[in-house]
Amino acid sequence: MRLLIVEDSATLAETLRATLEAEGHVCDHAEDGVVATHYLSTHTYDVLVLDWMLPRLDGLGVLRKLRQTGSKARVLMLSARDTVADRVEALDAGADDYLVKPFALDELLARIRALARRPQEGGAAMLVQGALHLDLHARRARWQGVDVQLSPKEYALLELLLRERGRVLSRVAIFDRLYDSASESSDKVVEVILSTLRSKLAKAGAEDPIQTRRGFGYVIE
């Protein structure tokens, strides 16, 4: 998944980023609410880890702007504010979950995993394409019940196309979801990941579910 960490504490933000990237996620960091809205206007994110108390524009302001755009990105709000009224205000503004500071990193990771298992349309924690199953909790691909050993990027590409089933995604759009803003890679790396993914699926005996639309991109229908 691609995540945006919106946190003005550089130390906490770096800890969160290192922890989440170790879990296989792609992360950008915004140090205040204005920078966050810029990121949100130029990139698509699956999850926001959003601090409430931010310089220039607070977390609720960011959240309201996000929901006004119709974005379905899941939002985990972080705050030292711990009253019921605070939680209600954040959830009513569009947050999906609320975590009070200070918190344990293990709990934050568990909450993000829970959000990841909650597809935006409210489906189950499994993406299925014929005999190909993607377990969103274990982050594991299986063909006819047998594990297919994928790299984090291969898994992320397959998950993205299954989540966006029926929608043709360009190479640039896929790259934007798989790599952070500081990446020095070219979007041509998507073709390499796709090639190795297809090879591993073929080796496992799986049918290739990914269609190439010349000049447009890739899609799973």
Image (tube, grey):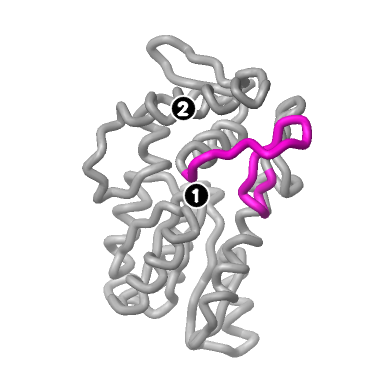
The span shown in magenta is 135-152
Q: Residue at x 25, y 33 (%)?
A: 186
- Mark carried by residue 15: none
Location of the C terminus (image quadrant): top right
Q: Which residue is mark 1?
A: 1
- Determine the secondary structure under disc 2: helix
Q: In the image, what residue occupies the spot 42% across and 41% down?
A: 177
- At 65% across and 39% down in the image, what residue appears? 141
Query: Where residue 40 appears, x then y in whole percent?
Result: 37, 51
Marks 2, 1: nearer the viewer: 2
* Position above or below: 215 against 16: above
**Residue that lies at the very extreme toward the left in this rendered image:** 184
Q: Please name whichever residue, 17 or 168, is drawn nearer the observer in this view of the structure.
A: 17
Q: Quadrant of residue 42?
A: top left
10 Å crowding of disc 2: few (<14), some (14-19), many (20+): some
Q: Could you say where residue 220 lies in the image, as x and y percent from the top left?
A: 60, 23
Q: Name the residue type under label 1.
A: Met
Identify the amino acid type marked 2. Answer: Thr
Q: Looking at the image, is 61 positioned above or below residue 124?
A: below
- How crowded is the residue under tag 1: few (<14 C-alpha within 10 Å), some, or many (20+)? many
One can see residue 92 in this view: no
Residue 34 shown in magenta: no
Figure check: 7 above or below 103: above
Where does label 2 land, which residue?
Answer: 196
Whether residue 121 appears in this view of the structure is yes
Image point 31% across, 76% down: which residue? Answer: 8
- Quarter of the view holding residue 176: top left
Viewer-proximal residue among 80 and 109: 109
Q: Nearer the viewer, residue 148 or 89?
A: 148
The x and y percentages for residue 67 are 51, 55
Mark pair 2, 1: CA separation: 19 Å
Q: Is residue 189 left or right of residue 201?
A: left
